[in-house]
Image (cartoon, grey):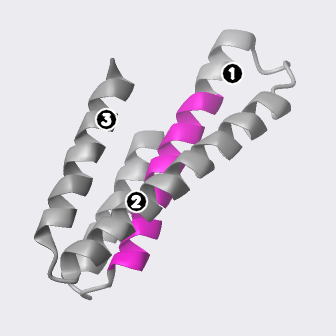
Amino acid sequence: MLGAGATGIATGTLLAGWVAAAGPGPLLVGGLAAALSWDLGEHAVGLGEQLGRETDATRNLATHAAASVAVGAVASAVAFGVYVAAAGGQPVVALVFLLVGAIALVSAVR
């Protein structure tokens, strides 16, 4: 059910970009909302399964939410910066940003 909700938000975001030609700002916010809803929901469900429903996990959930929002905000800001740099007729700068992002992603996955 959680995955279906996050997929619905992501699909709505994609449709807003395709049908309504929404700008990058609303699309980044929609994508971030979809990712956060899935991540925070999965974390809460996982804690509930591992620790039980009676455990007070408010602090853990709040910390995870704050960290997820911070990471998402930074990622959205970088994505918007790449968009602005590429839209300004500077494709070399956009290529450098994409290369740095790919390197950061690969190093984070390792």
Please report the residue visible at 27 percent of the width from the left and 28 percent of the height from the top.
Answer: 106
Q: Main secondary structure of the magenta part?
A: helix
Please name whichever residue, 13 or 68, is drawn nearer the observer in this view of the structure.
Answer: 68
User: Helix, strand or loop at disc 1?
Assistant: helix
The residue tagged 2 is: 78
Q: Amino acid at mark 3?
A: Leu
Q: Residues within 10 Å of mark 3 (few under 14, many from 20)?
A: few
Q: CA distance from mark 3 to mark 2?
A: 13 Å
Q: Earlier in the sequence, mark 3 or mark 2?
A: 2
Task: Indicate yes or no whether the magenta region holds residue 16.
Answer: no
Q: Residue 25 got which mark?
A: none
The residue tagged 1 is: 48
Please name whichever residue, 70 or 98, is drawn nearer the observer in this view of the structure.
Answer: 98
Q: Is residue 32 above or below residue 106?
A: below
Please report the residue visible at 31 percent of the width from the left and 35 percent of the height from the top.
Answer: 105
Please name whichever residue, 101 or 37, is drawn nearer the observer in this view of the structure.
Answer: 101
8 lies left or right of 48: left
Please name whichever residue, 92 or 51, is drawn nearer the observer in this view of the structure.
Answer: 92
Q: CA distance from mark 2 to mark 1?
A: 33 Å
Residue contact between numbered discs 3 and 2, judged by CB atoms under 8 Å: no
Q: Residues within 10 Å of mark 1 (few under 14, many from 20)?
A: some
Q: Residue 105 got which mark?
A: 3
Q: Earlier in the sequence, mark 3 or mark 1?
A: 1
Q: CA distance from mark 3 to mark 1?
A: 29 Å
Q: Is residue 35 above or below residue 49?
A: below
Q: Amino acid at mark 2?
A: Val
Please report the residue visible at 20 percent of the width from the left and 46 percent of the height from the top.
Answer: 99
Q: Which region of the structure is painted magenta?
A: 24-44
* Location of residue 101 in the rendering, given as x and y in whole percent from the top left corner: 29, 45
Q: In the rendered view of the protein, which quadrant contains the N terminus?
A: top left
